[in-house]
Image (tube, rainbow, N blue to C red):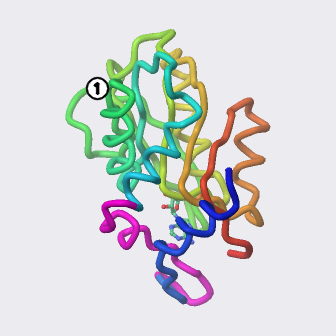
């Protein structure tokens, strides 16, 4: 990506120090989403690697991945699939456990959300350690999808999440990066 474009999108992301816990720099994308030009540019850049290809569905991780994934699905003329925290989806689900900083959590998808062989893209706002995205990749693959790639507005490269996904054979596309945590 062009370096000036990169600097520009970063300036729409607000950093909240010590939220939700001391030591965390929370990268808040509500300021980017609230700006018409920045939101459009972020979505355009997220779909750019797949422009012109046939994508069956975009899978978004709760909750900020829903906002980005809905817009991307519209732009790619694809369907949208939600990946949710456990207990939120009403029909039969597949579930996977994943580790957080403290303890375990679980995420789910509807078993009929994807047909085996479909071409899927995964999206979330940010990749840090990659634990959340790795769990989503496992769910998508368990349903036989062809995962073309995972995209995120923000990469925190020092936490290694992008490398972790690439080690699973997933192509990773990110728009901006923040060094440190
Ligand atoms: P991880 O599983 O460590 O890659 O964490 C990624 C998930 O946690 C994403 O859904 C992010 O929205 C959220 N997250 C992690 N770290 C941050 C941060 N510094 N600022 C905002 N969101 C974060």
Left or right, 121 with respect to 112, comes to right
Considering every residue shown, the one lying at the far left of the view is: 90
Determine whether the beta carbon of the residue marked 1 sits less than 8 angstroms from the nearest atom of ligand 1: no
Q: Residue at x 67, y 70 (%)?
A: 178
Image height check: is 80 above or below 24?
Answer: above
View quadrant of ligand 1:
bottom right
Q: Is residue 87 magenta?
A: no
- In front here: 165 or 100? 165
Looking at the picture, how far across and down is residue 7, in whole percent?
62, 69
Looking at the picture, how far across and down is residue 35, in whole percent?
33, 67
Which image quadrant for residue 17?
A: bottom right
Q: Residue at x 52, y 85 (%)?
A: 21
Looking at the picture, how far across and down is residue 69, in whole percent?
38, 42
Q: Residue at x 51, y 31 (%)?
A: 121
Looking at the picture, how far across and down is residue 115, in whole percent?
40, 12
Which image quadrant for residue 181?
A: bottom right
Density class for disc 1 (Cα within 10 Å; few <14, some 14-19, many ≥20) is few
Which image quadrant for residue 134?
A: top right
Image height check: is 148 above or below 31?
Answer: above
Q: According to the image, label 1 marks what residue? A: 92
Left or right, 123 with respect to 154, comes to left
Magenta stretch? 20-37
Image height check: is 103 above or below 88?
Answer: below
Q: Residue at x 51, y 73 (%)?
A: 27
């Amino acid at each position: 990506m062009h370096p000036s474009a990169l600097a520009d999108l970063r300036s729409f992301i607000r950093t909240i120090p010590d939220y939700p816990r001391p030591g965390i720099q929370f990268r808040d994308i509500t300021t980017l989403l609230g700006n018409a030009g920045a939101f459009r540019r972020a979505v355009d850049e997220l779909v750019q690697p797949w422009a012109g290809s046939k994508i069956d569905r975009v899978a978004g991780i709760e909750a900020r991945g829903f906002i980005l994934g809905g817009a991307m699905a519209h732009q790619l003329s694809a369907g949208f699939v939600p990946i949710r925290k456990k207990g939120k989806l009403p029909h039969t689900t597949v579930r996977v456990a994943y580790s957080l900083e403290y303890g375990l959590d679980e995420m789910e998808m509807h078993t009929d959300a994807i047909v085996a062989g479909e071409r899927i893209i995964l999206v979330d706002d940010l990749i840090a350690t990659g634990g959340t995205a790795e769990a989503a990749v496992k769910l998508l693959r368990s349903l036989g999808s062809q995962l073309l790639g995972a995209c995120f507005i923000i990469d925190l490269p020092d936490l290694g999440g992008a490398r972790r996904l690439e080690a699973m054979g997933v192509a990773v596309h990110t728009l901006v990066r923040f060094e440190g945590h």
